[in-house]
Image (tube, rainbow, N blue to C red):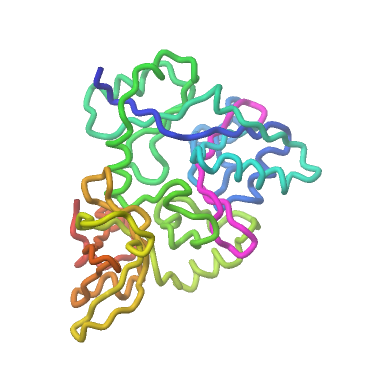
Amino acid sequence: MTTALMRLDRSLLLLAGRDARKFLQGLTTNDVLRLAADDGAAGADAPRCVYTGLNNAKGRVLFEAFVWGAGAGGDLLLDCDAAARDGLEAHLTQFRLRSKVEVSDVSERFAVASVLQGGGGAAAAVAERDVLASAVDPRCAAMGRRLLLDAESPLCADVGDAAPYRLKRTTLGLAEGVAEIPPTEFFPAELGLDYSNGISYEKGCYLGQELTARTHFQGLVRKRVMPCHVSPSRGPPEDASRLIFPVDAQGERRESGRLLHDGTGTEGVGLASLRLDRALDPGVQLLTSCGRQVQPYLPVWWALAGKDVDVDHVLGQ
């Protein structure tokens, strides 16, 4: 049966205890204290879900996650990439110390699903059915709604393939999971967390905050993850093919970034981490070391959201 509901490959960690929010507030780039609680303590306009990063002490991203308010006691659910679950749980446990908070894996009790925009009446009907929580994807409204389900719910047996979700996410330039975001490789702004509502510049101190704030206030972002069109591969996969070199008029090559996703399974649309000065130079052709052409573009939603981008390079999708 075709359905607008897509179950995602995510795990869920529960942070329970009176210090849960204060504890996570000191580890994440976003402000989790403003999340809604069942008792309404955070206010009627409080979000049900926020997107965030968790940094190391040097300000590099270890994990990305969605955080949901869970219960009247201030408990939280972390919705993370399934492959990142063990590492994220260990990271949280490392910093727990004397905080009154317990970290537990509840992936068998809950499931995460998505309903994209454009689903018409079917999407609206799914969003209104019996779910534990529902929120517009906090990264970008074009990603539709994110749903938190009981794993035993009949809804989980009535889900479609997540390929449309992956295609939409990639087309919008949103990297996700450890396969695309290797731990410690990127600063938050390089991943676009500043564009996708994943950073609060008004909250107090947190792990890795100093460099994150400095990058923002001094405007020092020199590379970003961007969507790109990638030509088909003519040979077996090679790690070297993920390096991107610009070829200028003199035929010289300099490494300018790397592919994070090569477009397989997403209609040739991939993700690349690129130096902006070279990626947006119309006189430069980007090639992998194996000769695959890479054509980056700036997502339309960056400009629509008022981001500081060169609209002449917004090609659309």
Q: Hey, which residue is sitting farthest top in the picture? A: 154
Residue ID at (49%, 37%) = 49
Q: Quadrant of residue 250?
A: bottom left
User: What residue occupies the far front of the structure in this picture?
Assistant: 236
- Which residue is depicted at the point 19% across and 77% down? 283
> As drawn, is 206 to the left or to the right of 200?
right
Q: Is residue 313 above or below residue 193?
A: below
Specify the farthest residue to the right: 98
Q: Quadrant of residue 98?
A: top right
Question: Is residue 53 on the magenta stretch?
Answer: yes
**Residue 279 seen from this side:** yes
Q: Where does the magenta region start and end?
A: 52-73
In-image side of 251 versus 42 (left or right):
left
Location of residue 100 in the rendering, given as x and y in whole percent from the top left corner: 77, 37
Q: Is residue 253 above or below residue 290?
A: below
Near-viewer residue (92 or 215)? 92
Left or right placement of residue 203 versus residue 153 in this view: right
Residue appearing at x 34%, y 28% in the figure? 6
| Residue 269 forms part of the magenta stretch | no
